[in-house]
Structure formats: C-alpha cells, structure tokens
Amino acid sequence: MRARRGLAAVLLLGTLAGCGIEPTEVIEFGQPATGVKRPGGPGWQARLYFAAVSDVIGVPRPADGPVGAEDAVRLLLDGPNEAEGIRGLYSEVPRKPGPGTDVVVTTGQGRVDIRLPVDVTGLTRIARNQLVCTAAHNEVPGAVPWNRVKVTLSGGGKKLNGLECDRL
C-alpha cells in the first residue's frame, strides 16, 4: 500500500511539473509537412511530384473534382506554381511541348501510358519519378493502390515498361 502511495505521489509531481513549460517560437526547418489535408480545405486535390534537393516530393493542388492521371500529368508539365517555386520545388520534366508535339496520356485497369515527344531514356531519374508518381497517385481505373499502378513511358522510339512509384 505504501508503495502505491509513493508511486501516485511521483506521478502527481511529474504531472504538475510539466505545467510550467513555457511556449517557444516557431522554428522553421526543412520542407513543410505533406500528405495531410487541412481542415476545411478543398475536398478534391491533385497530387503532383516535383523535385526538391535530390529527390521528389508529393504536393497537393486543389481541384474542382476528381483528378485522373491524364489531368495530373498535364498539370505537372506546367511546372511548379509560384508558391511551390518559392518553396524551392522545381521540375526536371521537359516543359509542355509546342503544338503538334503533345504529350498523350492513356489509362487502363491499373496502368498508365505516357507518350512524350522526347527520347524517354534520356530523362533523369528524378524526371521519371515525377511522371510515374504523379500518374500513379491520381485516379487510375481499376481501384489499384498507387504503389501497384504500372506506368509506361514512351517517346523517341524508346519505351520504359512496368515502372512503379515508390514514393509516398
């Protein structure tokens, strides 16, 4: 019984001691958190992948409704918006080509095919990840999880088959 009272006293003192902690200022460090919706934020969003330092990160963009892989890839081709650029995000994917050299995106059950007007074997690892993850993380027919969506990149007479996103 005496041990219980002693333990209760220690726990009570520990709880009371924690009440004197003073608040601190906000310390900014690293990239902002991603992946969590803000309360009251838009119900729909596209998830685009942009380059940051030496890898890619997913960035939500508000949308008026569900965003398919086709629309998401087209948004990616426009590059980061002003706010994303200020955060230091950039794109290694070639900018939207001119007329007659469109990027063609088609989807099927658990797959996305992206045809580019460039040799896809010349794309950097980051550019490939940007395209594959952007396509996989938006709506694709077949209710397949994003990490099981198969993406094919083709262009310049070359083809990269069965690519999967390994980024959240």
Image (cartoon, rainbow, N blue to C red):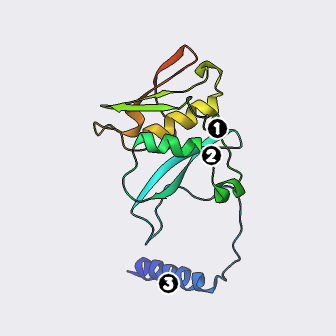
Taking the view exactly as shown, the residue that stands out farthest to the top is 157
Name the one closer to the observer, 163 or 15: 163
- Residue 73, position in %: x, y? 50, 40
Name the one closer to the observer, 63 or 29: 63
Badges 1 and 2: C-beta atoms under 8 Å apart? Answer: yes
Residue in the image at 48% along x and 34% along y? 165
- 55 to the left or right of 153: right
Find residue 12 and name its label.
3
- Residue 47, position in %: x, y? 49, 49
Residue hosting label 2: 79
Quadrant for residue 25, please give it.
Answer: bottom right
In the image, what residue type sits under mark 1?
Arg
- 124 to the left or right of 116: right
Name the one closer to the observer, 168 or 81: 81
In the image, what residue type sits under mark 2?
Gly
- Residue 100, position in %: x, y? 55, 29
Q: What element carries label 2?
A: loop
In the image, what residue type sits under mark 3?
Leu
Residue hosting label 1: 95
Name the one closer to the observer, 58 or 33: 58
Q: What element carries label 3?
A: helix
Q: Does residue 143 appear in this view?
A: yes
- Residue 27, position in %: x, y? 71, 68
Residue in the image at 40% along x and 39% along y? 146
Q: Does residue 166 appear in this view?
A: no
- 36 to the left or right of 55: left
